[in-house]
Amino acid sequence: MNPQLDEAIRQRGKAFFASIRGESPSIFNKGFWTGKVMDWAMQNEAFKVQLFRFVDVLPYLTTSDNLSRHIEEYFTGGDAGDIPAVLKWGAEKSGLFGGVAAKLMGKAIRSNIEGMARQFIVGEQTKEAVKNLSRIRKDGFAFTVDLLGEATVSEVESDAYRDGYLEVLGAIEAEQKSWKPFGAGEGGLDWGSAPRVNASIKPSALFSQARPMDFEGSVEGILARMRPVYRKIMAMGGALCIDMEQLKYKDITIELFKRLRSEAEFRDYPYLSIVLQAYLRETEHDAAELIKWGRAEGLPFGMRLVKGAYWDYETVIAKQMGWPVPVWTRKPESDIAHEKIARLILENSDLVYFQCASHNIRTISNVMETAAQLGVPENRYEFQALYGMAEPVRKGLLKVAGRVRLYCPYGELLPGMAYLVRRLLENTANESFLRLSFADGEAEDILLENPHKTLDRELEKNPPKAPAAPAVIDGLTAFRDEPLADFTVAELRRAFPEAIAAVRAKAGRALPLVIGGKAVETADRIPTVNPADPTETLAVVCQAGVAEVDAAIDAAEKAFAAWRDKTPRERADVLLRAAAIARRDIVALSATQVLEVGKQWDQAYNDVGEAIDFLEFYAREAVRLGAPRRMGREPGEKNHLFYEPKGVCAVIAPWNFPLAISVGMTSAAIVTGNTVVYKPSGLSSLTGYGMADIFKEAGLPDGVFNYCPGRGSVMGDHLVAHPKVSTIAFTGSMETGLRIQEKAAKVHPGQAYCKKVIAEMGGKNAIIVDDDADLDEAILGVVYSAFGFQGQKCSACSRVIVVDSIYDKFIARLTEACQSLKIGPAEEPENAMGPVVDPSQQAKVEEYLEIARQEGQVLVERQATGQGCYAPLAVVAGIRPEHRLAQEEVFGPILAVMKAANFDEALAWAMSTRFALTGGVYSRSPRHLEKARREFRVGNLYLNRNCVGAMVGRQPFGGSKMSGVGSKSGGPDYLLQFLDPRVVTENTIRRGFTPIDEDDEWFD
C-alpha cells in the first residue's frame, strides 16, 4: 500500500476514535444485565458456549417447568464454567420445581434474553417495525429491512417468506411519503443517489428445495418468488439487496442476481445490489467478474461488501466434508481482502454503487481515504452498520460521512434467536473489532494498523503449525475419507449428464461372468434395467448356475495359497491402486448407479466415495494387523500372535449400496489374503461388473476375485453350503440373512471349516424429536433420512417419535416439507426422490401403505406418474409400538409418526423392536442427550443430525439384535472376521543359556 495513503487512513482513524472517546456500545455496558453477561462470556469460554446454546433453545421452552429444567441443565455442573451470580442463583433455585422463586427467576432470565434479542431486531410485528424505521430516519440514518426466518423447509414456508416482504413493504409504502430524503434529495433520493426504501433478502428462503446439485432449478425457483418482491420495490421507487449466505448458495446467488438485473422488465431500473463476503478466498475474483459482466451488459448495480458471518460454519463443514477451506483462516487476511476488493469497487464507481458494511474503524477509514484518493464522488458510496450494534461507531460515522444505513432485521423472536447468536458470536470473538475497541481496550495504533503488518506480526508470534505428522505404517500415511460430493463445483455438475450419456451409449451389451480371470458366457441371461424406465435395458447379464459356482470356487481355491503368501503390504498395494482407479472414474461409476438403481447424483457419488474409503482404510488396517505381535515379556520364550486368512469367501451383496458395500466386503476379504466368489444383486450387476474391471486394472491376480452373478433360487444356497467356502459376507434382508446362517451351520462332507457368517441385515430405525428440538434441523434431517434414495437404506428412518408438546408443530411442518419434494427420474437433479428399484419393491411399499391405512392416518401420500417403478411417498400418523408399521421393515418411502407423552416413553418406543441398527435424537437437553447415549442401544446413534451416511473410519457401521452379526464395517476390528489368529511359542533356553532381548522383562 502507498505509505502516504496508509498514514492518511491512520490519521482519519485517530480522529474518528477521538470523536467517540468515552462512549461504548450498549451491549458492553456493564451497568445493564446484557453487558454483565457479555462480560462473563468473554472471560469464560465454557460459559459462553452454554449461554449461546441456551439462547438458541430458549424460544422452545414454553412452560415454566421446561425453562427451569433447562436452566439447571445448562448452568450447573462441570460444563457450565464460572456462572454469573444472577444465572447461578436461578440455576440452583430451578431445582425447586414449582417453587415461586424458581419460576420468577426463570421468567426474569427469559425476559432479559428476549430483551437482548430485541436490541438487534427492529420489530416483531409490521406496525412496530415501521414505527422504528421512521424513528431511525428521524435520527438521520437510512435503513435496509431484512425479514428474519431464512430457514424454510417447505414451499408453503417459502411463500410465507415472500408474502412477509410484500406485507412489510406495503406498510412502508404508506409511511414513506412522510420521509424527507437525506442530503440534497435530488429526485426524492437519499443523498441524491439512494432510494429511501431499501430491503435485503435471503435468496435461499424463497425456494425450500434450493441446492447446488440442482443449480438451474434453484436459480429459477428463487427468481419465481423474488420477482414479485422486486416488482413491488420498483413500484415504490425502492432498492433491493440480495444477501449472500453460505458458500453453497454463492454461485446460485450471483447467477440469479445477474438474471434479475438483466431481465427486460427490470433492466432499466438500477437499484439492485448484491452482497459479497470478503472472508471467502474467491470473492476478489467474483467481484472482478461481476464488474466485467456489468460493463459488458451496460448495467449499473450496487455491491455491499461485508467481512462475512458464517466463518465457523464454513470451516467446520469443509473439514467434515474433506473440501478445501474456502475462507481466509486469519482475521487480518479478511481485512486485507476487504481493502483490496473495496479499492476495486471504488475504481469502478461509475458502474458500481459501493456499500461498505463494517464496524471496523480501520476499514471505514480505508474506504474514505481510498475514495478521496481516487476522486470518487461521495454519492457513489455509503456505509452500513447493524441495528443495535456499534452505536458509537455509527453515530461517529454519521457525523463524518453523513451516509449511514442500518441493517434492520424484522420478525419473530424464534428465528430472531438464531440471528442473535450470530451477533453474539461476532461481539465476543477474540478478533472482534468492537470487542477489542470497547471491551478489551486495545491500543488505537494496533487497531488502525495496516492489516498486512498485523498479519506479519501474527505469523511471527504464531507461525503456521505444520500438520501433525500422521502415523506411518510401512510407508502409508494415515487414512482420510474421500471428499464428499461438492456440487458447487460447476465441472462436477456438467460431468454427470455426460457420464450418464456414456452409460447409455454402451446400453444393451452382454456382461459375462469372470472366473479365474476369464470371461465366461452362459445361456441364462437377465437384463438389468433403469427403474425409472423399465423398458430401457442397460445390460444383459449372464447368470451363473451350479456348475459355474463350482468353477468359481475351484478357481478361488486354486489362487488362494499364492495370494495368502503375499505380504500384507503387497495385498494392500492392490487395494490402493484400485482406490486410485475408482477415484479417477468416480463420476462414471456414479452415473451407472443413477441409471441402474435410481440413486440421486449426490447419493451415487458418495456411494463410490465410500467404496474408495473402504479400499484405502482396509489397506492400512491389513498392514497394521499384518505384523506379528509379541505376547508377554517373560525371558526364555517368544510368543508371537499373528493372523492368517481362512480361504474362499462368498460375498453376497445388496443392490442399495451396489458399489460401496460390495467393495467393502470384497476388499476386506481380499486384503486379508482370502479369495472371493462375488454374487452381486441381480438388480445392480452392471455396477458390480465395474468392480471386476477395477480389480483387473489394479493387477489383482486371476482367481482371487471371481464375478459370479446368478439367480438366488438357482445358485444361492449352493454357494452358501459349499464345503470349500469358509466365510460368507452378506448384506441384505433379515430373512435372507437368517436363512444363510441356518444353511451355513450345517456341515457337509469334505468341509474343513466351521463357516464364519458376517451378516448386516435390516433395521427399523427411529428418530426421536424432543420437545426442545430445533425443528428447522429436525424436519430436514427426518425427511432426508426417511426419503433419501426412496428410503431404501438399512439405516433409513422409518419411525419418527415425537414428544407430545411439540407434535402438532412438527407434523404441520413435516407434511408441508414432504409435499414440497420433487419426485421423478434420479438422473434429473431437481428430483429429491426417484423410483424404487423394481416392481416387487414397488408392490411391497403399496402393500404396506394399505396396512398403514388400517393402522393409522395417512397424512401425506404422493405418487409420481409415469412408467417407472414409483412407489408412494407416505407419512402415517397414529402409529403405536404394537402396529406392524412400527415393527416390520418396509425398505421404502413410508414414514410412521408416533406421538409419545414424554422423552422417556419415546426412548422406550424407539427400543421396542427386534432391530438395533441406527437411531437418532434431536434434542437440546443435555440430560436427555446423555440418557440417549446410555440407553438408546443401537449400533449407530446420531445426535442432532440425520441417521444415515456413516463415514468409514469415523462412524464404523453395523448393529446388533436382528440387525446383524459381526463387527462394524469401516472399523478397527472388521478385518479380524476374515482371519484366524495363530500363536507360535518358541523356547529360547539352550542348556541354561538364555539370550535376553531388549523388550524382555528383566532386571536393571
Image (spheres, rainbow, N blue to C red):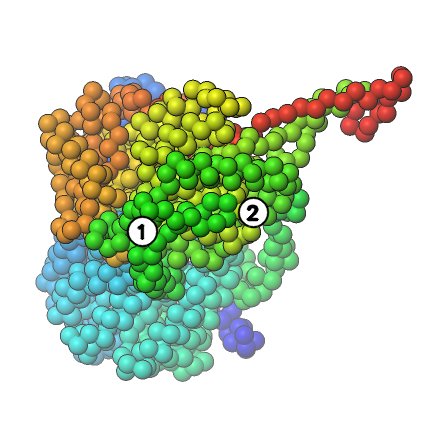
Q: Give the residue number, with chain letter if any, for mark 1.
A: 540
Q: What element carries label 1?
A: strand
Is residue 901 toward the left or the right of residue 280 in the image? Answer: left
Counting residues from the start of the chain, the first of labels 2 and 1 encountered is 1
Disc 1 crowd, CA 10 A, few/some/many (<14, 14-19, 20+): many
Residue found at x 27% / y 68%: 257
Residue found at x 61% / y 37%: 561
Q: Is residue 248 above or below residue 959?
A: below
Q: Is residue 473 above or below residue 177?
A: above
x%, y% of residue 624? Answer: 62, 37
Q: How far apart are marks 2 and 1 (CA)?
A: 26 Å
| Amino acid found under the numbered disc labelled 2 | Pro
| Amino acid found under the numbered disc labelled 1 | Val
Is residue 608 toward the left or the right of residue 173 in the image? Answer: right
x%, y% of residue 836? Answer: 24, 44
- Considering every residue shown, the one lying at the far top of the view is 992
Q: Is residue 774 visible?
A: no
Q: Quadrant of residue 211?
A: bottom left
Between residue 38 and residue 723, name the one nearer to us: 723
Residue found at x 54% / y 32%: 647
Which quarter of the rendering shows the N terminus? bottom right
Q: Give the residue number, with chain letter if any, for mark 2.
A: 701
Which quarter of the rendering shows the C terminus? top right
Q: Is mark 2 on a helix, strand or loop?
A: loop
Label ID, residue 418: none
Between residue 438 and residue 639, name the one nearer to us: 639
Between residue 897 and residue 971, name the one nearer to us: 971
Q: Is residue 192 above or below residue 901?
A: below
